[in-house]
Image: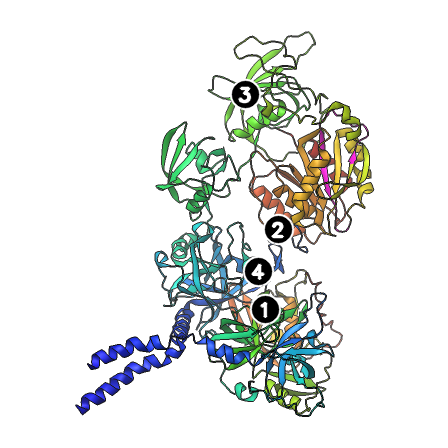
C-alpha cells in the first residue's frame, strides 16, 4: 500500500513535470526549432566572393524609370549555400552572384575554406550550382514536396551573419504561407527571407529541408527579381526535391532554362477570361516543330484542362527545356493530340517576319508599291524591284491569293501572321518600262525571313504618294477580269484601311493644325506640358513620323529650341513631327508613362500620323524613360533611339502586332557603357532588331552628326515589311 | 484508480494553464517603456523615439539620435503622465543616451521622488548570459509613433538570428557602434523604435532596439539591438579604455561620465607588405598582385605575382580598396596572416609587416562617389 502510494506520488510527479512548464507553451516549440537549426547546420555552407560590381539589376544610375526593379547595391558580405552532393556540389541562389564577382570561396562547416567554381545556373528557378574540392560531404534529407502544408512551421536558415560555423546557424521563424507559387515553382513562407539567407535552407521543424531560399517574383525574371520583397513576410523557396532533381542536369555544366512551347497568344493581355488561341509562332520553337498553327486553341496539357493563359503558365512554369508534355489543341473544331512534345528553350524568342521591302506611303491604289528593296533580303532573292507593286499574297499551295486592298498596313499585318521560313507565292505587278506598256503581272516565290537590323545607306525619295486622305481603292471582284481601279465611293474594309484618316472636318483643318515651334502647350485633360515642332510645309496628304523627345534631367521644356535646331531640316524634308513632353519633376518616373502617352496621342490627333514610325528618343534619364515607354506604351511607340541609357531588367517579349526596334547609343567614356552593352544583348536576345553605335571619346554628350544621319535613315525605314 | 487519476492529470494540466504566455510579460514590460518626443519632424527626421526605464528615479536609456537635440524633451509614461526630460550624457560609440525625467521644482541631481515601481536594473540584467540564435524574443517600441500617453507601446515577437558584429551604414557613413548586436527577425527597423527594450520570452532585458540603418555587408535594412552588456573601446588621447553600457549608466547617473575627445582617426597606410596591385579601375577591383618589391615582407613570405589576396586574418578582402582599408588598421612589426588564391587553391602566408621605405608612394584610399 505504502509502496503503491509512493509509486503514485512518483507517478504523479512524473505527470506533473511535463505539465509544469505548460505555463509557457512555447518552450517545447522553441527547443524543437533550435534542434532543427542544429541538425541542418552541417549542410549550410558559407559563401564569400571578391570583385564584381557595386550595384546590380539596374541601369546603374540613380533609379529612374525602368522595366524592372530599381538598381540595388549588392552587398559584399557572405551568403549561404546548401550541400547537394557528397563530391563538393553546393546549390545556392543566383542572386548571390548577381554582381558577377571574380572569385568565389566556400566553407563547409568543420572543413577548410576552398575556391569554388560556378558549374551551371538554373535560369528558371534562379539557382546556381557550385563545385569545390571536397569529398564525402553530407547531403541533407528533403521534406517531401507533396507533404508541405500551409501553416506548418518553417525556418529560414542562413549563414551570412554567422562568424562561427561550428555553432548552429541563425534562422528566422515563420510558417508556410502557400505552395505552388511563382507558377508552380516555389513555396512561400512568412519567415524573413533576404540576402542574409538567400541560398540557405527553408527547414521544417523536424530538421528536413523544405526548400532553398531564393528571391522570386511572379511577374519578373532575372537574378534580382523579387529582392524588393526581402524581409517583407513574403519569401520563397524552391522545393528541395525539385532542386535535387535538377542537380544532375546542372552537373553537366550547361545552364538549364524554362521550357517553352514558343507561341504568342492572340490576345496577350487576357490572363483569365478566354481560352488561349495561338496568335503567332516563334521560329525554331516546339510549336513550329509539331506543326501548331495560328488559330489553334490550347485545350489540355498532360491531361489537365487549360481554360486560360494563367493555367498555361502554372502548368508550363515548372517545366524545363527538354521536358516533354502531352498536348491537345482544337483546330477548326477538331481535337488534335500531340504526345511527348519536347519543350524548347526560352531563347527561341519571336522574330518579326520580314519581306525586305519599304513601301511607298500614302498610296490609295491597289496593292503596295515598293520603295526600296533591302540587300540580301527575301524580297531581293525573289527578284522584287523598286517600283513593283505587291498585289496578292498566300502561302505556297493555297489556291486563292489574298488581295492587298488595305495598302501597306494590311500587307504588314498579313506578313506578321506567317512564321519565319514559310514559302509564299506573291503576285507582283511589274513597273512599266514605258507609260503605254501593259501591266505585267507575275507570281514569284518568296521565303519569309526574320527581321534583323540592316541600315540602308540612303533611301530613295519620295517616300510618299501624297494621297493620305484618299480612301483605298477596292479590289476587283474575285474571279473577274482585272479592271481599272474602282472609284472611291466603293465600300472598303474598315479594319484594313491604310493610313489613319483625318478625324476632323476639312473646314477646321487650318486652325487645328498649327505649324512651326509650338511652345508652352498644355494637355487639357491631365495638365501635362509639352512643346511641339510641326514643319511649316506640313501637308495633310502625307503621313508624318513622330519623334518623342524625352528631355534629360532638369531640362524639361527649355531644350525645345535646341532640339528644333538639330531636327528641323530633317523634319521638313522627311515629314516628321517633333514633340517634347515635360516631366512633372526634375527627372522622369515610370508612373508618368501613361499620361505622357495620352498627351502625345491628343496632341497628334489633328495631324496625319504614320503610326508605324513613332519613336521615343532621349538621352540619360530621358533615354531610360524612352526604353521604359518602348516596353510599356506599346500601342504607341514603335522604336526607341536612346543614348546613355540602359535597361534595368530583362527585355520584354517581342510581340508580332506591336513591333519595336532599337537604336542604342553609348559614349565609350560613359560610366554606363557596360550596362548599355548588356542592354544591346538583352534586346537582341529577344530578337528585337537593334542597332548599336559606340561613339569614340563621348561621355554624356548628345550624338554626333554621323550617328544623327544614320538615325534619320533608320527613322525613315521603321515601316519596313 | 491511479491510472485514471494520472490520465485526468494529463488531461487537465495543459487545459488549466493554456493562458497565452506572452500576456503577463508584455503587460509588465510595457510599464518600463516611455514614449519619447523631441526635435526633428522635418526633412524625414523623426521627432520621436522609445525610452527604457532603468531606475526608480526616472532614468531611462534611448538611442543617441537627433531626436534629443532639443531643450524641450517630453516623455509619456505608461500610466499616461506627460513629463519633461533631460539628457544627462550620451556616448555615440554605444549609440546610447542616458536621460532622466524632470520633476518641476527639483534641481538637477536631486532625487526626483518619482519612486517608479517598474524599471530594469541594468547591472543585474547585464550579468545574465547572452541569448543565442533561435531564442524567441519580444521587442517593445513606439514604432511609427502609434501610441500616446497611456496607450501601450507596440510589442513584436521574433527570433534571434545571430549575435554578431554590427556592420552598419547610415547613408554613406559607417555607423559608430561596431560591437556585437542581436540581429532579430522582428522588423524593428522603422522610425521611433530605437531605444525600446528587447526582452526574452520571460521579460528579461537582452538589449536596446537600434536605429534605421543598413547592414553594409548585405545592403539590407537590419533589425538589431545593442546588448545590455555592450562594451566599446574608447580612445582618449593616447590612452584606450573599455567602457560597458552598465558602467556608462552608473557613471552617468553619478554625473561622472566624461565624453571622450575623439581624435581624427589615424589615416596612415598601416604596415608595409611590399605588394603592388593591378591598377584599381573598377568599383571592386579584385586584389591581384601585380608586382612584389624586392626584399619586402611579401617576398620573404613567398607571395607570387598573380596571387589574389582573399582574406587577411580571416576577414574577407573583396577589393583593392578593402585591402587598403584593412591594412590601415595595422602597423609595422605586426604579423598578419594572408590567404591568397593561387590557381584553384588557397595558400596561407604569414607576413611580418615592415616600415614603409622612404620615398615610396603610399596608397591613398579614396572612396568612389557614393551612389544613392
SS of the residue at dot 4? loop
Q: Which residue is mark 2?
A: A648
Give the extent of the magenta segment: A533-554
- Circle nearer the N terminus (3, 4): 4
Same subunit, labels 3 and 4: the answer reads yes
Inter-mark Cα distance, 2 to 4: 22 Å
Q: Which residue is mark 3?
A: A393
Nearer the viewer's eye, disc 1 or disc 3?
1
Same subunit, labels 3 and 2: the answer reads yes
Q: Which residue is mark 1?
A: B189
- Give neighbour class at mark 4: few <14, some 14-19, many 20+ (Cα, 10 Å): some
Tell me which residue sits at (58%, 9%) in the image: A482
Inter-mark Cα distance, 3 to 2: 41 Å
Chain that bears disc 1:
B
Locate residue A106, reporting x and y percent.
Answer: 49, 66
- Circle nearer the N terminus (3, 2): 3
Nearer the viewer's eye, disc 2 or disc 4?
2
Same subunit, labels 1 and 3: the answer reads no
Quarter placement of the N terminus of chain A: bottom left
- Give neighbour class at mark 1: few <14, some 14-19, many 20+ (Cα, 10 Å): some
| Residue contact at pointers 2 and 4, CB within 8 angstroms | no
SS of the residue at dot 2? loop
Chain that bears disc 2:
A
Same subunit, labels 2 and 1: the answer reads no
Locate residue A524, reporting x and y percent.
Answer: 73, 40
Look at the image and tell me whether residue A3 can be seen: yes
- Image quarter for residue B49? bottom right
Nearer the viewer's eye, disc 4 or disc 1?
1
Amino acid at each position: 500500500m505504502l509502496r503503491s502510494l509512493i509509486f503514485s506520488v512518483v507517478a504523479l510527479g512524473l505527470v506533473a513535470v511535463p505539465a509544469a512548464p505548460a505555463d509557457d507553451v512555447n518552450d517545447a516549440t522553441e527547443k524543437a526549432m533550435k534542434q532543427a537549426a542544429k541538425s541542418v547546420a552541417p549542410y549550410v555552407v558559407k559563401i564569400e566572393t571578391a570583385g564584381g560590381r557595386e550595384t546590380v539589376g539596374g541601369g546603374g544610375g540613380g533609379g529612374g524609370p525602368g522595366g524592372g526593379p530599381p538598381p540595388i547595391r549588392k552587398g559584399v558580405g557572405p551568403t549561404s549555400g546548401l550541400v547537394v552532393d557528397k563530391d563538393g556540389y553546393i546549390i545556392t541562389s543566383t542572386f548571390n552572384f548577381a554582381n558577377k564577382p571574380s572569385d568565389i570561396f566556400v566553407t563547409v562547416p568543420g572543413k577548410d575554406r576552398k575556391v569554388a567554381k560556378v558549374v551551371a545556373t538554373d535560369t528558371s528557378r534562379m539557382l546556381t550550382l557550385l563545385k569545390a574540392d571536397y569529398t564525402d560531404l553530407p547531403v541533407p534529407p528533403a521534406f517531401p514536396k507533396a507533404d508541405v502544408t500551409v501553416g506548418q512551421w518553417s525556418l529560414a536558415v542562413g549563414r551570412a551573419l554567422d562568424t562561427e560555423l561550428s555553432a548552429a546557424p541563425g534562422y528566422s521563424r515563420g510558417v508556410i504561407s502557400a505552395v505552388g507559387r511563382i507558377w508552380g515553382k516555389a513555396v512561400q513562407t512568412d519567415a524573413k527571407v533576404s540576402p542574409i539567407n538567400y541560398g540557405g535552407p527553408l527547414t521544417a521543424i523536424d530538421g528536413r529541408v523544405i526548400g532553398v531560399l531564393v528571391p522570386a517574383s511572379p511577374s519578373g525574371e532575372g537574378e534580382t527579381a523579387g529582392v524588393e520583397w526581402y524581409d517583407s513576410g513574403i519569401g520563397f523557396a524552391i522545393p528541395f526535391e525539385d532542386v535535387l532533381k535538377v542537380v544532375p542536369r546542372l552537373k553537366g555544366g550547361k545552364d538549364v532554362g524554362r521550357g517553352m512551347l514558343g507561341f504568342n497568344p492572340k490576345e496577350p493581355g487576357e490572363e483569365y477570361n478566354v481560352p488561349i488561341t495561338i496568335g503567332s509562332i516563334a521560329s525554331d520553337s516546339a510549336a513550329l516543330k509539331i506543326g501548331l498553327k495560328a488559330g489553334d486553341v490550347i485545350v489540355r496539357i498532360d491531361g489537365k484542362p487549360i481554360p486560360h493563359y494563367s493555367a498555361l503558365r502554372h502548368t508550363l512554369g515548372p517545366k524545363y527545356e527538354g521536358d516533354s508534355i502531352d498536348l491537345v489543341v482544337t483546330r477548326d473544331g477538331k481535337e488534335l493530340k500531340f504526345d511527348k512534345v519536347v519543350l524548347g528553350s526560352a531563347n527561341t524568342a519571336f522574330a518579326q517576319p520580314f519581306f525586305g521591302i519599304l513601301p511607298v506611303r500614302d498610296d490609295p491604289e491597289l496593292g503596295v508599291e515598293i520603295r526600296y528593296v533591302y540587300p540580301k533580303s527575301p524580297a531581293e532573292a525573289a527578284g522584287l524591284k523598286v517600283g513593283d507593286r505587291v498585289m496578292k499574297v498566300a502561302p505556297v499551295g493555297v489556291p486563292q491569293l489574298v488581295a492587298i486592298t488595305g495598302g501597306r498596313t494590311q500587307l504588314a499585318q498579313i506578313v506578321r501572321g506567317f512564321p519565319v521560313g514559310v514559302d509564299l507565292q506573291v503576285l507582283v505587278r511589274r513597273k512599266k518600262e514605258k507609260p503605254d506598256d501593259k501591266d505585267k503581272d507575275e507570281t514569284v516565290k518568296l521565303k519569309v525571313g526574320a527581321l534583323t537590323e540592316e541600315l540602308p545607306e540612303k533611301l530613295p525619295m519620295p517616300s510618299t504618294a501624297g494621297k493620305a486622305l484618299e480612301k483605298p481603292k477596292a479590289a476587283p471582284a474575285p474571279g473577274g477580269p482585272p479592271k481599272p481601279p474602282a472609284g472611291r465611293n466603293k465600300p472598303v474594309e474598315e479594319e484594313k484601311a491604310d493610313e489613319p484618316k483625318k478625324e476632323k472636318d476639312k473646314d477646321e483643318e487650318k486652325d487645328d493644325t498649327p505649324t512651326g515651334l509650338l511652345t508652352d502647350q498644355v494637355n487639357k485633360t491631365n495638365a501635362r506640358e509639352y512643346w511641339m515642332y510641326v514643319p511649316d510645309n506640313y501637308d495633310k496628304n502625307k503621313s508624318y513620323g513622330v519623334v518623342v523627345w524625352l528631355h534629360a534631367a532638369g531640362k524639361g521644356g527649355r531644350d525645345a529650341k535646341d532640339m528644333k535646331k538639330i531636327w528641323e531640316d530633317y523634319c521638313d524634308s522627311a515629314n516628321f513631327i517633333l514633340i517634347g513632353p515635360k516631366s512633372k519633376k526634375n527627372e522622369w518616373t515610370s508612373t508618368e508613362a501613361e499620361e505622357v502617352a495620352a498627351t502625345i496621342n491628343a496632341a497628334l490627333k489633328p495631324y496625319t500620323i504614320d503610326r508605324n514610325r513613332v519613336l521615343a528618343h532621349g538621352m540619360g534619364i530621358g533615354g531610360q524613360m524612352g526604353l521604359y515607354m518602348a516596353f510599356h506604351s506599346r500601342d504607341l511607340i514603335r522604336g526607341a533611339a536612346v543614348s546613355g541609357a540602359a535597361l534595368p531588367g530583362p527585355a520584354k517579349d517581342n510581340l508580332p502586332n506591336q513591333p519595336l526596334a532599337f537604336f542604342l547609343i553609348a559614349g565609350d567614356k560613359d560610366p554606363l557603357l557596360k550596362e548599355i552593352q548588356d542592354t544591346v544583348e538583352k534586346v537582341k536576345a529577344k530578337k528585337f532588331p537593334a542597332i548599336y553605335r559606340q561613339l569614340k571619346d563621348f561621355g554624356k554628350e548628345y550624338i554626333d552628326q554621323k550617328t544623327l544621319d544614320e538615325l534619320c535613315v533608320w527613322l525613315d525605314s521603321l515601316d519596313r515589311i | 484508480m491511479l491510472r485514471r487519476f494520472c490520465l485526468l492529470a494529463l488531461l487537465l494540466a495543459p487545459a488549466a494553464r493554456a493562458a497565452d504566455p506572452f500576456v503577463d510579460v508584455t503587460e509588465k514590460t510595457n510599464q518600463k517603456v516611455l514614449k519619447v518626443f523631441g526635435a526633428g519632424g522635418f526633412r524625414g527626421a523623426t521627432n520621436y523615439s522609445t525610452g527604457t526605464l532603468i531606475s526608480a528615479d526616472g532614468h531611462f536609456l534611448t538611442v543617441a539620435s537627433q531626436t534629443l537635440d532639443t531643450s524641450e524633451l517630453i516623455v509619456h509614461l505608461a500610466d499616461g503622465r506627460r513629463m519633461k526630460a533631460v539628457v544627462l550624457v550620451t556616448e555615440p560609440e554605444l549609440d546610447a543616451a542616458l536621460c532622466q525625467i524632470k520633476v518641476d521644482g527639483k534641481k538637477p541631481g536631486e532625487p526626483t521622488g518619482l519612486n517608479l515601481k517598474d524599471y530594469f536594473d541594468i547591472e543585474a540584467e547585464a550579468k545574465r548570459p547572452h541569448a543565442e540564435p533561435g531564442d524567441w524574443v519580444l521587442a517593445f517600441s513606439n514604432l511609427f509613433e502609434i501610441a500616446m500617453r497611456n496607450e501601450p507601446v507596440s510589442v513584436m515577437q521574433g527570433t534571434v538570428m545571430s549575435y554578431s558584429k554590427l556592420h552598419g551604414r547610415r547613408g554613406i557613413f559607417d555607423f559608430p557602434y561596431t560591437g556585437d548586436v542581436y540581429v532579430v527577425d522582428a522588423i524593428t527597423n522603422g522610425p521611433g523604435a530605437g531605444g525600446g527594450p528587447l526582452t526574452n520570452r520571460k521579460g528579461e532585458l537582452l538589449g536596446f532596439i537600434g536605429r534605421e540603418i543598413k547592414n553594409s555587408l548585405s545592403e539590407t535594412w537590419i533589425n538589431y539591438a545593442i546588448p545590455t552588456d555592450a562594451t566599446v573601446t574608447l580612445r582618449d588621447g593616447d590612452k584606450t579604455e573599455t567602457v560597458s553600457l552598465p558602467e556608462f549608466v552608473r557613471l552617468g547617473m553619478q554625473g561622472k561620465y566624461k565624453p571622450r575627445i575623439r581624435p581624427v582617426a589615424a589615416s596612415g597606410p598601416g604596415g608595409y607588405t611590399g605588394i603592388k596591385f593591378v591598377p584599381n579601375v573598377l568599383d571592386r577591383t579584385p586584389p591581384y598582385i601585380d608586382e612584389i618589391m624586392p626584399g619586402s615582407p611579401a617576398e620573404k613570405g613567398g607571395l607570387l605575382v598573380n596571387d589574389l589576396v582573399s582574406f587577411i586574418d580571416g576577414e574577407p578582402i573583396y577589393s583593392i580598396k578593402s585591402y587598403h582599408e584593412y591594412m590601415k588598421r595595422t602597423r609595422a612589426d605586426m604579423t598578419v596572416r594572408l590567404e591568397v588564391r593561387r590557381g584553384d587553391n588557397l595558400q596561407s602566408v604569414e607576413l611580418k609587416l615592415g616600415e614603409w621605405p622612404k620615398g615610396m608612394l603610399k596608397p591613398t584610399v579614396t572612396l568612389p562617389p557614393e551612389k544613392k
